[in-house]
Image: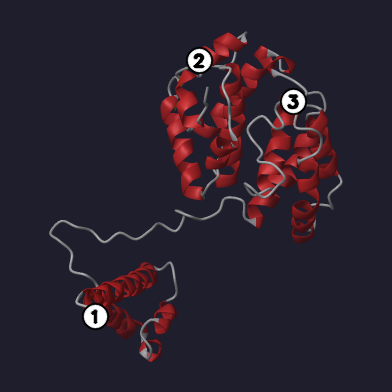
Amino acid sequence: MAPAPVAQEAGGRRRRCRCTSAVLLVATLALAGWLPLAAIGFLFPGQEARPQAGRREAVLAALAATATPLLPGQAMAVDAPGATAPVFVDSAIFERLEHFKDIGVPATLQDPIARAAIADGTCRSVVAPGSGPFPLDGYDFWHHNPERVDAVLKALTQLPSTSQPSKFVRAAKKQLPNACFYGFRTETNKLELYQPTALAKTLSNWHRVLCDPQCDDPAEEPQQQALTTGFICMAVCDTAKMKFTAAAISALSASTAATQSVTKSMCAAMPWTITRGPLTPLDGLKSYEAIAGATVPWRKVCGCTA
């Protein structure tokens, strides 16, 4: 019978640890300015009535009382706000789809590369991974052009005016997913649909907006980075005759922190400098083989698989 008290004590410790972690997190965020100090009233009843300075001292005292002592040199870890923050919130969906609908589609009527990218970006913005009849991988638009691509772009252009953002986003999330899964799973085109020189130039443009420190219109928002890295990886994996799986493309937008990490890795793998521009120029390459050879450093970042 001896083990029972031990198990109860262990369970109590686990509950106490979880409670302490919550106290530490909320109180630290309040002190850092990420949450209002009034939030500590939920943790320490009665503190919300104190003056702000008094509440601050009370929180510090409470933290000292509840925190587990740190070892020398050990720092208290608090998750960054963006660690699990979703990329495609409504404002992000509006920002991308407004651009695609009002500018992208009209400007790319004769550009199969851009049209495939817009279709892919549209659906990644509104379809959560695993929420459709089948997982969307990196080639579900790239290799379904114009069949599924045209269906998505038609549905996009039929959405309400972007002058009413909330109505536009609600309609997009309701109407676009059906078009995203239009047609058969069998691929309807291969890489050869896209001219190598045009693909190299487009890759260079995507590289620039991600990595050029002097770009005047950079992809600096998480949703822009998540989609642009995906566009790059479609071409990188395909020219290398490799797969770009649903898991790999979903990882690019798993969270804002994940997106920013991938973008940083992509720019580190193939830098774009102020003085020399891209250390590995892509614009001007004339074959799929040349593109594949130049973009080898991106294969690991993209998650291309054999």
Which is in the foreground here, disc 3 or disc 1? 3
- The residue identified by callout 3 is 187
Q: Residue furthest front?
A: 1
Eyeballing the image, is 148 above or below 259? above
Residue at the spot 72% in from the left edge and 42% down from the top edge: 99
Q: Is residue 1 above or below residue 153?
A: below
**Which residue is under mark 2?**
294
Tell me the CA gap for discs 3 and 1: 63 Å
Q: Which class describes the residues within 10 Å of circle 3: few (<14), some (14-19), or many (20+)?
A: some
Three-letter amino acid code at the position of disc 3: Glu
Whichever of labels 2 and 3 marks the residue nearer the N terminus, that label is 3
Which quadrant would residue 19 be assigned to in this image? bottom left
Q: Position of residue 250 (x, y in %)?
A: 57, 41
Q: Secondary structure at mark 2?
A: helix
Name the amino acid, label 1. Ala
Q: Is residue 130 visible?
A: yes
For label 1, the SS is: helix
Q: Pointer 2: residues within 10 angstroms few (<14), some, or many (20+)?
A: some
Distance from Cα at disc 2 to Cα at disc 3: 26 Å
**In the picture provided, is 70 more to the left or to the right than 156?**
left
Q: Earlier in the sequence, mark 3 or mark 1?
A: 1
Asked whether, in this view, residue 31 is left or right of residue 100, the answer is: left
| Residue 144 pos. (x, y %) | 76, 28
Residue at point 61%, 12% (across, down): 288
* Mark found first going from the N terminus, 1 or 2: 1
Percent coordinates x, y for residue 204 in the rendering = 58, 22
The residue indicated by pointer 1 is 61
